[in-house]
Image (cartoon, rainbow, N blue to C red):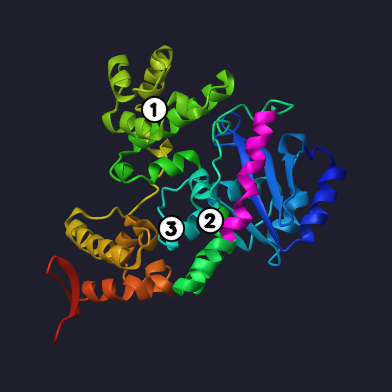
Amino acid sequence: MIDTPRALSQLCSQMENDSCIALDTEYIAIKQPEFTLAVVQVGLSTGEVYLIDALAFDDLSALNSVLESQNIVKVLHDAPADLVLLSRASGATPKNIFDTRIAARLLGIDSRHSLSALVAHICKVKISKKQQQSNWRRRPLSAAQIRYAERDVLYLHQIRKVFLSRAHKKGRTAWLEEEMSRFDDPHHYLEPSPIERILRSPEAYSFKPQQRAVVAAVVNWRFHTSLKTKTPLKKLLVNKEILRLAKRRSKTPGAVQNACSSLPHRYVPQVTKVVAKALNTPTPACPKPVITHPFPNKKQPHLRLLQAVVTRRTFEYKIDAELIATSATLQQLIQYPEEKANPLLSGWRWEVVGKDLLRILRGESSVEIIDDVIKIRSVRA
């Protein structure tokens, strides 16, 4: 384990002399509103693997130059959560990222593939994920934890090489580069608060001020209870249950218990009091709405039509549908078709489906079903 400034400095020197490193993280889900970084795994291109004890340092600013270097590729699987943790710990805006999960989705490999499934599929090696939810606060780590942590970065270099080769054969190298370049945007690492994240849910669009106050109060209760009892956040309440409490204005023990199946029974009285108090919050003191322009119901048919076209392109190109267009980007296109920031209006998404979707919305193209296949036809003036 790397647990001294000198050892970390030496490792950083090795990484700075490498052209490609593999990264992963292990975390603790009970010390912060979200996660606390516990271990950082580093896999060099030579095959050497190192574990950094993140709990041994006040911060990991020593990693800043490595994470921000455009000359060093950082390979991760399902990178966003790991990169947010690394950015928070180091103060860096990571650059030159290669996410093997995004690559898999872009190349037509099942997007549900976990890292262990990808390793089995490409490297023909079976790795166990039993230690993923183990206690990463403990020191020293067990032999099983160390073995698990090391194997999480051991095969990423090989997977990246395979994906680069497949992208070249499919003519999608530029697409892959476009997707990975999104990680260079500093806005990628701005973290919404847990309250804001829940209030961004479509279910919260129509919430009254006091219902938003319920969300804020229950999220804060969950956080402080998690700290006090050392209970993972999701073992207390999941976000959907918090939304349900607010939506139903559950202010009796029976209503709270009915809305929250995961809430331990001993906490029902506490949550009942929290909700009842929040429902009496003066309107000026309630959280402001996060989404000010909810998607109108009258445009739901537009959304369904565009989703059908995207689904068809998914089969044609063998690309994960959610990677091509999410419900949010389709809604944005319908409401604000000239918004250039929409990823559907540039790059490979524009070529695959974006330009056709825009023509449909403008009435310049029609959607037809011919021989059970969705077709796009130009509309003659």
Residue with the mark numbered 3: 105
In the rendered structure, does residue 214 fall within the stretch colored magenta? Answer: no
Residue 132, image x and y in percent?
56, 34
Q: Which mark is residue 5?
A: none
Q: Quadrant of the C terminus?
A: bottom left
In the rendered view, would you say 96 is above or below 121?
A: below
Residue with the mark numbered 1: 278
Residue found at x 72% / y 34%: 55
Residue found at x 69% / y 29%: 143
Residue 133 as seen in the image, left or right of residue 66: left
Q: Nearer the viewer, mark 1 or mark 3?
A: 3
Q: Helix, strand, or loop for circle 3?
A: helix
Amino acid type, mark 3? Arg
The span shown in magenta is 143-160
Q: Helix, strand, or loop for circle 1?
A: helix
CB contact under 8 Å: marks 2 and 1: no
Amino acid type, mark 2? Thr
Q: Earlier in the sequence, mark 2 or mark 1?
A: 2
Q: Residue furthest front?
A: 124
Q: Nearer the viewer, residue 168 or 305?
A: 168
Residue with the mark numbered 2: 100
Q: Residue furthest bottom?
A: 381
